[in-house]
Image (cartoon, rainbow, N blue to C red):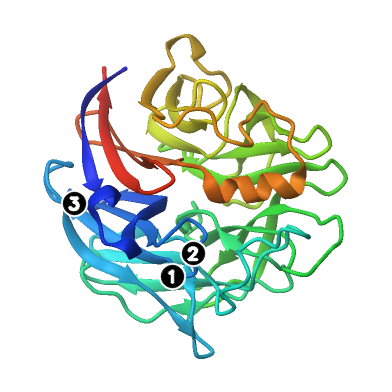
């Protein structure tokens, strides 16, 4: 695999002061060929003014237009900070947007409590579009109780039996000083997204102190088997370990135990490439800091590390809390708010190439970038 083309989606370096920070990438190719990229835009990575910008390309990345300069949501009179916006297309032009809303009305508090590592109050939302993302209806809240500290981690998943799954992770609330249990979930709806009563836990830190963060999924195009990949952190060793993968039934109700993939990294997005081929784009936070693509020919059971492709090299050098450094757990959470590149996403194009999007930059500004990768 090689990089065949690359470009800029949104240039934070030349943007207005409240648009300098880009992060939390989302990406989809619609049935009509349009590519949508969503990302959190704000003054800074942990600033309380985050919102979701949506950009569209109708020529596979050669040009971009802004569909929405900054989607926000007001709950209980509070215009919260949106941290994500993940797209799913169910029928041509009919989209869901899954987002995490955070109460940042107290500007003296960060998203993550530096003393407890608990999260500020969150709500998980869903909006619909019937015109390919041109316009969106009002957000409605997905009730994820009794789980706390919940954040959506990816697009709503269409399951083989027609049900829908809302992927999210649960943690603890802002002032909770307990040790804490982290879990990765599917909340399942059988009525088209009106209600979400069934809670399936795919992976948990309970009893093992291994954190399976930021689950990203891909569905086998023939068997319907679901693969989830995780940024995996060992709390007792105080470091990131190998990315893990697990496999679920086509109905999303039963899951294997997560297993190591043979490569250490962070955010990791699997991409179904046809048949048993599976790609994965991930953050290589340790030296040399970069973003990489690796291919599996057996849907994630083994990986061709010898031919791994680096498609982005960080220009900022080693960062605090990189993957091979032991780091106090409280400090590690704060490190996340200062990282300068990441959140890679990928989609398959009709000719077999991959279209990749991510953010990268400096402490002063970050930019949304893209690359086209193929053989």
Q: Do the numbered discs 2 and 1 sit on residues whose CB atoms are within 8 Å?
A: yes
**Which one is closest to the eye, mark 3 or mark 2?**
2
Q: Which residue is mark 2?
A: 47
Where's residue 156, x and y in %? 47, 59
Residue neighbourhood size for the residue with mark 1, other residues' Cα within 10 Å, grouped as few (<14), some (14–19), many (≥20):
many
Q: Residue at x 28, y 66 (%)?
A: 94
Left or right: residue 347 versus residue 185 is: left
Q: CA distance from mark 2 to mark 1?
A: 6 Å
| Residue lying at 61% horizontally and 38% vertically, measured from the top left | 231
> Which residue position is annotated with label 1?
49
Instruction: Rate crowding at label 3 as few (under 14), some (14 to 19) or many (20 or more) other CA atoms within 10 Å.
Output: some
Q: On the rendered structure, is 287 left or right of 340?
A: right
Q: Position of residue 284 (x, y in %)?
A: 52, 28
Neighbourhood count class around disc 2 (C-alpha, 10 Å): few under 14, some 14–19, many 20 upward: some
Residue 34 numbered mark, or none: 3
Query: Compared to 306, does 3 lie above or below?
Result: below
Taking the spot 49% from the left edge, 64% from the top edge, the residue there is 47
Picture disc at residue 96? none
Among numbered discs 3 and 2, the one appearing first in the sequence: 3
């Amino acid at each position: 695999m090689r990089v065949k083309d690359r470009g800029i989606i949104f240039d934070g370096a030349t943007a207005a002061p409240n648009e300098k920070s880009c992060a939390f990438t989302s990406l989809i190719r619609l049935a009509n060929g349009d590519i949508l990229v969503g990302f959190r835009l704000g003054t800074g990575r942990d600033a309380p003014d985050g919102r979701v910008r949506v950009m569209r390309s109708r020529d596979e990345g050669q040009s971009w237009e802004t569909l929405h300069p900054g989607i926000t949501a007001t709950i209980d009179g509070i215009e919260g900070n949106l941290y994500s916006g993940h797209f799913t297309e169910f029928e041509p032009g009919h989209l869901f947007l899954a987002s995490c809303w955070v109460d940042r009305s107290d500007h003296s508090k960060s998203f993550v409590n530096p003393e407890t590592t608990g999260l500020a109050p969150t709500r998980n939302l869903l909006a619909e579009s019937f015109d390919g993302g041109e316009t969106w209806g009002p957000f409605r809240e997905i009730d994820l109780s009794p789980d706390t500290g919940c954040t959506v981690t990816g697009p709503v998943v269409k399951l083989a039996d027609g049900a829908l799954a809302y992927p999210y992770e649960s943690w603890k609330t802002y002032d909770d000083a307990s040790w804490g249990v982290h879990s990765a979930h599917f909340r399942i709806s059988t009525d088209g997204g009106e209600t979400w009563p069934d809670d399936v836990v795919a992976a948990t830190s309970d009893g093992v102190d291994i954190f399976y963060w930021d689950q990203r999924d891909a569905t086998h195009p023939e068997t319907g088997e679901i693969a989830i990949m995780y940024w995996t952190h060992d709390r007792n060793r105080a470091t990131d370990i190998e990315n893990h993968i697990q496999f679920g039934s086509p109905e999303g109700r039963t899951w294997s135990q997560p297993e190591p993939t043979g490569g250490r990294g962070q955010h990791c997005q699997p991409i179904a490439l046809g048949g048993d081929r599976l790609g994965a784009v991930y953050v290589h936070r340790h030296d040399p800091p970069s973003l990489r693509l690796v291919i599996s020919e057996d849907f994630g059971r083994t990986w061709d590390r010898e031919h791994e492709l680096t498609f982005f090299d960080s220009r900022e050098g080693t960062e605090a809390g990189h993957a091979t450094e032991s780091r106090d757990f409280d400090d590690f959470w704060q490190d996340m708010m200062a990282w300068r590149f990441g959140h890679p996403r990928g989609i398959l194009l009709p000719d077999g190439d991959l279209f990749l999007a991510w953010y990268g930059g400096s402490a002063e500004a970050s930019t949304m970038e893209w690359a086209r990768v193929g053989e």
